[in-house]
Image: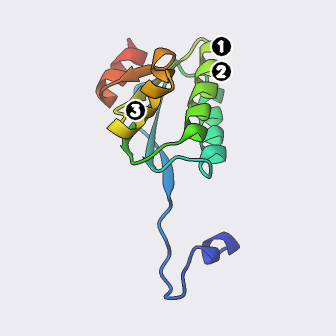
Amino acid sequence: MGERDRARVDGRGIRSPDAYVILERAAPEGVVLLVLRGEPDLAAAPAARERLEQARARRPRGVVLDFTEVTFADSSALRELLRADAALRGDGSLLVVAAAPPTVGRLLTLTRARDVLEVADTVELALERVSG
């Protein structure tokens, strides 16, 4: 067990779950589908930036971010979304936020980020948008 893993084990030997997870799922050719889970916040920002940069380096037609299992997102997560969106658009690619729960939808609406970002109600619609 590495030093970081040891730090996450409590006195009872129970390892706490990650507050956020970013996974890649299978997607149509030329599309990157990243699934976010948990609470992408300030602590998650570096990992999110790294994953989005890795996706961008592949020069995809589009990147879909599945927010189905996101329970909370803060301004740090929003900043990373906007940064990635601008970078991908500069490359001629599209970023689509998919299946945002009400808490994230409210953040996107209140900050007017919904006016800038591509948002789809479902992952399927997002995949269609970047594939077609």
SS state under label 1:
helix
Give me the C-alpha separation between circle 1 and circle 3: 27 Å
Q: Residue furthest front?
A: 110
Which amino acid is tagged 1? Gly
Which amino acid is tagged 2? Ala
Query: Which quarter of the image is occupied by the N terminus?
Result: bottom right
Q: Which x, y percent locates residue 17?
A: 47, 66
The residue that disc 3 covers is 106
Mark earlier in primary sequence (1, 3): 1
- The residue shown at (58%, 73%) is 8
Mark earlier in primary sequence (2, 3): 2
- Residue 11: image quadrant is bottom right
Judge from the rendering whether residue 86 lies leftward or rightward of residue 119; answer left or right. Answer: right
The residue that disc 1 covers is 90
- Front residue of this view, candidates 72 and 55: 72
**Is disc 1 in contact with disc 2, using a CB cutoff of under 8 Å?**
yes
Image position of 14 with respect to 87: above or below? below
Which amino acid is tagged 3? Arg
Give me the C-alpha separation between circle 2 and circle 3: 24 Å
Q: Which x, y percent locates residue 80?
A: 61, 34
